[in-house]
Structure formats: structure tokens, C-alpha cells
Image: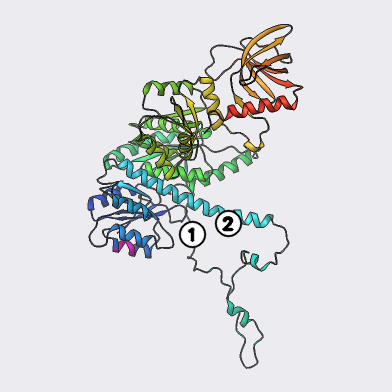
Amino acid sequence: MEYKSGASPMPHHDSQSFHVLIVDDDATILNLLREVLSMVPGCRFTTVSNPADAMTTIVKDHVDIIFTDIHMPGVTGLEMLKDIISLQRTPEVIVMTAYPSGEIANQAMELGATSLLAKPFEDIAMVELELEKAIKRILRQRSASKELPELKAKALANQSGEVDNDPPMKVSLDTPLRDPRAASEAKPSSPQSPAKPPAPVVAAMSPQPNPPTSINLDPRKIYSLEMLEALIAIEAPRALRYNRPFAIGFVDIPESFQATLPSEQERYRKGQIEKIERCIRRSDVLLEAGREGMAVVLFECNRVGAEVVQHKLRTSGFLHTGFKVFPADAKNAEHLMSEARQSVQNKRKFQIALLEPEDFFGRIVQNMLLDPKYFVNWVRSREDAYKLISREAESLKLLLMSLTKDPNQWELLIRLKKENLIQWPVVLFIDIPLTKDLKNQLRQLGVRAVVNKGISQEEFIYIVQSFVLPRPQMDERKNFRALVAIPLTYNLEGAEHSSNSFTLSRDGIFIRDMNPPSSGAFLQMKLFIPGQTEPLEVNAEVIYTVPYFVGVNRFHVSGMAARFVGLDEAKKDLIEGFVSACLTSYLI
């Protein structure tokens, strides 16, 4: 049987909707999955009880995702998988089995299954998580397929007007295919035979589907944000009574620096709202939130549905969105609105995931990242970390975790690597020496840096910033800077002072000093670089100073930044070699 999700499903578009096929002979599983899928916007699903009917559906209809059992009467799920991989277009396949670590499950993965689900389902959230990952992969593929023609068109437009007459190269040119009969019928007809009309141009090798018929709908009404609390108050009792959750969210509208006039700003905002409308269903509600952007109410929508809508919004250019689901995330209207607002505020920060089972060290890391521009998602177990990373993979900037002797710890990184979810650096806290083989293994798992658990806050912040803050491409940087503390002395107006460095590059240095001199002062310095028998004597000019003060809740180092003056190439090379070695000390 075929079903559509929601009371008012969105019209079928390849980029917005998807077809899910459920194959199981257990009616309980069918009903459970049907309940989950019915609250995902744009989801159309079909349920069958045997692989034979499933293959008929796959061949006749376009299927994006398949939930299938392994053990069923007649043809097994493995035999169906073998038939599926022979198709030209392979859907996402999620295998449900009571033995997820057995030999049969391994065979299913080798045959192309995307993931495994253990039956019976102990936590419905795992079902939603696997569904969400499959949907996101499909949406990413569709986004990429949309961008390819545009990139190809731009590449052709940038080419010169010269025609490549090389026969092998002509094969790759975008020339329309014509019916071979057209050439013969274009010849002058004989007097005995009447002329025939030319044959039509063949547009493609495969038949194209008929374009969808357009439906003239009334413009969507946009309500005031004042109505949001009343809408939640009406919908919340219904959600609890009928077990039909709903979601609300806030969407930041990006600023336009080109639109300066009020009329241009209004036109730009209207265009952005139209983009948001294309990401939600006709039955959902939009509310004008002013400087907060737009508020959205997604009726009969679970967590998976909210994540799907957020993914569509992100691919449409809305990077800061926050959605929360009732009753899973909040108990009342006020709490739900507060959680949704907090969610979008967190998205404006640098998202950092912290996996740390020890409360003491976890609090230390959180306290070191108290800067308002960071948002730390602290989880204590591998399963919670996997759920978090699967949902927030596109928003995360960094993963922090401790290196332990527990071999099960690496299962998380291996799983993330296998599912291509590691799209950001991984930093490990260590308190043991690293061997060369261990470094190679860590590098293969996506680990970019290792730091000692006794690291200072200043050093830790510096390393985090080097990963999460936007910066020029490394090959464009001519002045590499390292966080390194080396002893030094400097002479200022006849008086000698001793201190140590905070950062060092071939062009300058930042010196710690509680009472730094004013900018413009000239210093005669001696740098005691490790490995050198004699101190390196250099002259420098103070560019700016950072005085010491108390009561600021942010990263702060007092001292002065000085630029080297009259440094010859030999000294520059010596400093640059030392800086390069320091830069690689914590990098894998």
C-alpha cells in the first residue's frame, strides 16, 4: 500500500520529495515505520510484506530509500539486495535484523546496504537517525546534480570562441543529437515522391517525463509573530491527544550589502521569504519575526522532518536555523519558543562537539571555551556522540575527545570515517607518548592534532582558533606564526628586561609583559631559541600593546607585538625553521 505523509503533503517535486519502501512481514514493524514516516514533510511511502512485491515496486516506481528485513518467507532480503545492486540507480538500503553483528549482516553491508538497524527497536530515535542520514545523503546528491549543469554552463561561457576541430574532443561537446533520418529526408525529393516534413530533433536518449501541471494557488498568508504563542497553545493539546508532534523554528535571513534603498531591501526580503516557502509544505505556517528573521510552524512533523526542513533551508542559503519539536524538546509554549530561539542563537556560534566521560575534565574544557563565539556540545558516551555528530555534521567545526586505552573508543571514529561524517578536524587530549605507528593510525581516522591534558587555556584557545576561525589559504600565507614560549631579554632605554614570547614568526614576535612600553618603542632583544648555543640578537619596533586589566570574560594576554627590523635572511631562515617545527608539534 502507498501512503503520503501529513494531512496536506507538498506537491511531488524531485528535489523536495522522496519515496520510501518498507519491506517486512511483521505488521508491528510496518505500523511503527509508517507512523514515523507519516510526519516527515515530502515523504511518500509504500509498505509490502515480501521481497517479490518489493522488486515490482522498485522496478515500476522511483524508490529513494528501502527499509528491509533479512529473514522473510520465500526470497530473502539478501537475495533482494543482489537484485537491487544490478539496477542502474541504487537506492539507500537500511537493513533491519535481529543479529546486526552476525555474518548475514556483514554480507548485507558487502552487498551495498547503507546501514543496519537492530530488531526489535529499543529506541525509536535510532530509526529516525538512520532515516535522517539517508534523506540528507539523497538531498546532497540532488543539490550536487543541480549544480553540475550550472558549473558546466559557466565553464562553457568562459571558454573562448575558438572551435576545437580535434575529432576525439568533439565527442565531449554539448551538441544536440539529431535523428539520423533527418539528414536523409532533408535531401531534395524526387518528382515522383512528395516532400516529407523534416523529422523532429531528438532532445535526449531517454524519454523525458511530462512536466508537472501548474496549480494556481492563493498567495501564502504571513502572520504576525504575536500569533505564535496562540498557535502553539491550540496545537499542543492536539499533539498530545493524537500523538502528532509539531515543530517550530526561527530562520535568520542573511543580510544583503547590495540592497541599500528601502525598496531594494523589501524586494530582497520578499525573495528570501519565497525561498523559505519552497522549503516547507503548503499546510505549514510562516510568521514575520522582524529582526529575528522568520518563524515557522511545521504541523504534524517529528524530529526527522524538522531536520529535513533545516537541511533544505541550509542548501537554500539559510545557514542559521533553529527548530524544536513538541513535546520531545519542551513542555509548554513558552519553553518551546525559548528553546527554538536558543537553538538558532547557538547556530550563529562556532559549534564544537566534546566527547568526555569524566565530569571533572569536561568542565575544565568547557571553562576554557567560555568565549561567547563558541558553543560546546558536551556528550559523555559514544552513542550520544554519534547521534549528535550525525545530526550536526554540517554545522560542526571541531570534535574534541580524550585518547584512552579503551579499544572500543576507536569504533566511533571508524564508524564516522566509514559513513563520511568527519568533515572537520578532530583534536585529541593525551597524557601518553605517541609512537609513529599510532600517529599514522590517528591521521587515517581524521585526527588533526593532539594536545596534552595539562595545556594552558591560552595555548588551547590558540589551537582551537587555528581550526575554527576563517583564515586565508595556507599556500597564500607568507608569514606563519606559532604559539611558542621561548625565554628572551630586551633592552629598553638602557634598562634590561626579561620575559618570554607568546607567538613568534619570521617577521615579528608577541612578548608577554604586564606593563608593556608604548607603541613605536625600539627594542634590542636576545632570543634563546632551543638547540642554539648562542642567543639570537635582533632589533624590533613595538607595533601595538595590550595592557593588563581585570574583569574581562574573554581570551586575553597582556604584552606587546613587535616587528623585527633589519633582520638578514640567515636569521629569518633560522626563525622560520624553528616556527615550522613548533607548528607541527601538535599537528598529526
Q: In this view, does 239 lie above or below 544?
A: below
Q: In which quarter of the image is residue 270?
A: top right
Where does the magenta region start and end? 52-56
Is residue 363 visible in the rendered image? The answer is yes
Q: Quadrant of the N terminus?
A: bottom left
Residue at the right extreme, as displayed: 566
> Helix, strand, or loop for circle 2?
helix
Image point (54%, 15%), residue name: 552
Residue 265 lies left or right of residue 92; in this view the side is: right
Front position in the image: 178 or 323: 178
Q: Position of residue 513 (x, y in %)?
A: 62, 12
Q: Position of residue 356 (x, y in %)?
A: 39, 28
> Which residue is denoted by mark 2 in the rendering?
149
Name which residue type carries label 1: Ser
Q: In this view, does 274 lie above or below 385?
A: below
Estimate how packed mark 1 is, as few (under 14), some (14 to 19) or many (20 or more) residues with alpha carbons within 10 Å: few
Report, in whole angstroms, how far the alpha carbon at label 2 lies from the one at label 1: 24 Å
Image point (49%, 69%), residue name: 207
Front position in the image: 583 or 413: 583
Q: Which of marks 2 and 1 is nearer the N terminus?
A: 2
* Residue 55 shown in magenta: yes
> Which residue is denoted by mark 1 in the rendering?
214
